[in-house]
Image (cartoon, coloured by chain):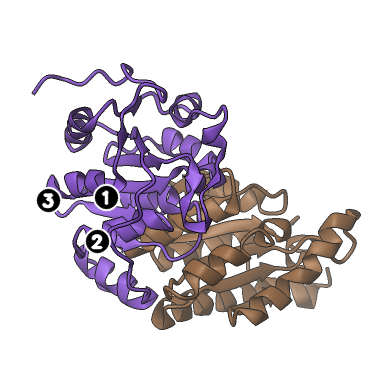
Amino acid sequence: MPAPEPGSASRDTAKLMNRSDLIQRLVAKLAREEAVIGGIGHTNHDLWASGQRPQNFYMLGSMGLAVPIALGVALAQPQRQVFALEGDGSLLMQLGALGTVAMSAPKNLAIVVFDNGVYQITGSQPTLTSYRTDLVAIARGAGLMQSAWAADEAHFDGLIDIALQGSGPWFIATRTDDQPPAGVTDRDATRIRSRFMQGLGVSR
Amino acid sequence: MPLENAARMPAEAWDEIVVRVLKANEVKLITYVPDKVLAPLIKRVHADGFFTVLCPAREEEAAGIVTGAYMAGCRGIVLMQTSGFASLPNVLASLAVPYQIPLLMMISERGTLGDHQLGQAIVCRTMRPILESLGIEHHVITRLEDVEFIVERMIKQAFATQAPAAMILSPLLTNKTGKK
């Protein structure tokens, strides 16, 4: 596999991809019970639709906390690879979390952002990324030096492969289209929590 | 203080007791947003290799980190002041309470008993109504001799009942007894 060049794409040149397809690509690579935290909204709907792995956690509220929750998992189980999946609107709510991840620098954490430039679930009002804001530039500025726009699907696959080698923390941003999610998460918070804990081998 | 009272007082400061009880209950992950009253406790946990200590940018982040760590098998706590607690209701109502997370919170109570900051005083009055409307167990600690009992019991109950818990440190504790 040729090593991807993390800095070769920009937000303007990155291919517009499909969130559901990218999440399926990511999940298809997970062979070691990696944990995946799906942020609020369409992000966790598409994670749900990709197959309900016990190691998936679906946020039904607490907008912006996918990265902090994933960081907590990564710190508690350093042997397990952890992915935080967030939308651009969600990440913009909790930008300080990027600095916290950079400070604690867990090798087993990767943040994957789906930037469609809008708050899709509330009627596609534009987010700040539709104007001047570049999330990869923000991540680098927060101290996450391994931050990249995925140029296309193949580049995305390569970046995920690198993150899976425990070389984190990684910040992988994707440009995504306006397609609706492929499913809707079942809204049973306690079941989500207890199943996730079982999936991580934790008894309460 | 009068001698008869001194004889009954624990030898440890409140922050020493809290550290001892956290350790005894395997609470290893300490997250905090700084507060002057909590400073001796923060200094103590930083100096103790038992703990993993993180200072994120916001209390919401701290609550998320502790939630994730709990689900992955590591117990944690969020240290904050009253105004920081006031930034948490959405996270408590949409994460900690519905997902039944034993989110431990230790809140230094500012804005009362002589605080000179109006903002702190107003926000302080929102704390208990928020905790009560969310049905979150909370107790205020006012006396040094109650620290161990309350902290120990609240931690145990939080994990036994899968529920968040708020331990409120009154100036009666931290201002009167913390400066020994």
- Using the numbered discs, state the Cα–Cα distance from disc 3 to disc 1 in whole angstroms: 21 Å
> Which chain is drawn using purple?
A
Q: Amino acid at mark 3?
A: Arg
In the rendered image of the structure, the colour used to display chain B is brown
Q: Residue A32's mark?
A: 3
In the image, taking residue A198 as reference, residue A171 lies left or right, namely right
For marks 3 and 1, the one nearer the N-term is: 1
Q: Amino acid at mark 1?
A: Ser
The answer to whether residue B47 of the structure is visible from this angle is: no
In the rendered structure, the residue with mark 1 lies on which chain?
A: A
Residue B25 place in picture, x, y as percent:
41, 68
Q: What residue appears at the point 20 percent right and 51 percent down from the top-left corner?
A: A34
Position of B40 relative to B124 (above/below): above
Residue on which disc 1 sits: A20
In the rendered structure, the residue with mark 3 lies on which chain?
A: A
Q: Amino acid at mark 2?
A: Ala
- Using the numbered discs, state the Cα–Cα distance from disc 1 to disc 2 in whole angstroms: 8 Å
Residue on which disc 2 sits: A49
Around disc 3, counting alpha carbons within 10 Å, would you say few (fewer than 14), some (14 to 19), or many (20 or more)?
few
Around disc 2, counting alpha carbons within 10 Å, would you say few (fewer than 14), some (14 to 19), or many (20 or more)?
some
